[in-house]
Amino acid sequence: MSERTIAVVTAGLTSPSSTRLLADQLAAAVRDTLDERGVPRRIVVIELRDHAHDLTNNLLTGFPSESLRSVLDTVTRADALIAVTPTFSASYSGLFKLFFDVLDDKALVGKPVLIGATGGTERHSLVLEYAMRPLFAYLQAVVVPTAVYAASSDWGPHATALRSRSTRAATELADLITNTAPSTGPIDPFDDSTPFEDLLKG
Amino acid sequence: MQFGVFTVGDVTEDPMTGTTISEAERIKSMVTIALKAEEVGLDVFATGEHHNPPFVPSSPTTMLGYVAAKTSKLILSTSTTLITTNDPVKIAEDYAMLQHLADGRVDLMMGRGNTGPVYPWFGQDIRNGIALAVENYALLRRLWREDVVDWEGQFRTPLQGFTSTPRPLDDVPPFVWHGSIRSPEIAEQAAYYGDGFFHNNIFWPVSHTKQMIDLYRRRFEHYGHGAADQAIVGLGGQVFMRKNSQDAVREFRPYFDNAPVYGHGPSLEEFSRETPLTVGSPQQVIERTLTFREHFGDYQRQLFLMDHAGLPLKTVLEQLDILGSEVVPVLRKEFDSLRPAHVPEAPTHASLKAAAERARSLETLETVEAGDR
């Protein structure tokens, strides 16, 4: 079986951040599940903080810098995506949204996605269902049923419950990955232009 | 090889003085820049077309007609003519008229315009941008090439027995370039007709621009207009020069930092690395511009953006002096010596007229030969 790439996009701001901790936990659970099934895999973690300036510049100039372009390409070509954001003002963070604003709106079509979010209190947990899931639904990604939310308490007394949610979500993502053909990447519009006679027909 | 300047015609506050010139001053300074271009030995002046502030050039042929009267060698062009929101009938008439007044020193660059709100002001919808460019240009070509046109399409009222007046000078329509930053369809259109393709080469990295130009060259050959390296390519570029490169950087930085389009974004250094922007000594500009040929192949037209972001007219005229005296003569010599003999120059009215006459005399010859048999 050919190697599958899983891109992990995390929008935590501090170091260490609980958002990165959750991203790592989800990535490790997916890795272990795929390893158990003998599926070769590569995991690429993208810290959006490292690209914050380039993302703003892309918004202003209309094109990505070379390093941002390679990140966007990685996500576009990946076989699956794990996307994790902190909860800011009842939604995903601005930095998180900026990345998906800059990413081509066809980049995630049909791609298996696992969504996660962190926050100070459990009261924000539905951010996954009313903010994150609609965003990826709009982008026509295939989001796994289990979304994983981690509040501060999940890193202490409720750590076992968090881990079991992560494992369940990881299994769902691994199922989708193994049942989907490997990503062939996007179609290059410069390789395959529409013949002008077809454009003339309107 | 043709060299020239292209202007957007923006009215922007000068960040060094906090003052903004009037529309009247901006319009007159655009004319001064055009006349200066001829004076310093440049070949082309091209003006943008805009219908919203902070831009002034809404009526390109009015301006170019005036410049035509004041110049004798300069080729007058556009950057770009809005093929989407202008009526192709009016473009056919306006630019044929300009051709006569300018003794053929006219070509055009077609563009779609990327300002959404402008479209409905002219009864159109930006979502039809490509379809408008395709249909309107197909009609424009017929209006210039056929004396009487019957036509029906999707976007304008049908024409019955219509003759666009005046007819093009010497029955030779102006040469047309198609400008597009990132639409493969427009590179395809330029290739289909064997027209020129222009990339503004200012806002995007070389790797992207190369994809557009390579597509155009490949399809130019596919449609049988010649080999890929004989396709007619034009490029933009953006430079600011002083004798010492540090002085150029120091002087240009506030204009860069506050410029419309990319201001308040990447640093001058980042943008210079990622795009063809060159701020430095004349020698640095020469070296950078020569690399365009390495990336995109031998090309026919190089236009520089010199007057924008609130740069004072005096500074722009100094830049044109440097361009005309120190940069373009070297580039002209270098590019000409590097270009193989089979790669053509950009078409002009004279060359198109000669080609049309050759084609007509061949037709006559064939008729005579057929009669002999």
Image (tube, grey):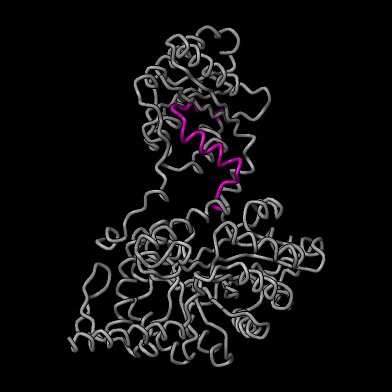
Residue farthest toward the front in the current orientation of the protein: B373
Q: Quadrant of the C terminus of chain B?
A: bottom left
| Residue toward you, B146 or B336 | B336
User: From the viewer's perspective, is A46 left or right of A38?
Assistant: right
Q: What residue range appears in magenta?
A: A61-87
Residue A37, x across and y down, in percent: 42, 11
User: From the viewer's perspective, is B238 left or right of A4?
Assistant: right
Total residue callouts: 0
Q: Quadrant of the N terminus of chain B?
A: bottom right
The residue located at (54%, 61%) in the rendering is: B297
Residue B239, x across and y down, in percent: 68, 65
Q: Residue B178 appears in which quarter of the rendering?
A: bottom left
The residue located at (54%, 41%) in the rendering is: A98
| Residue toward you, A10 or B272 | B272
The residue located at (52%, 84%) in the rendering is: B63
Residue B357, x across and y down, in percent: 37, 87
Eyeballing the image, is B63 above or below B111?
below
Q: Is residue B201 magenta?
A: no
Q: Is residue A63 magenta?
A: yes
| Residue toward you, A11 or B288 | B288
User: From the viewer's perspective, is B91 left or right of B249?
Assistant: left
Eyeballing the image, is A198 above or below A82?
below
Residue A143, x across and y down, in percent: 39, 26
The residue located at (47%, 56%) in the rendering is: B214
| Residue toward you, B227 or B12 | B227
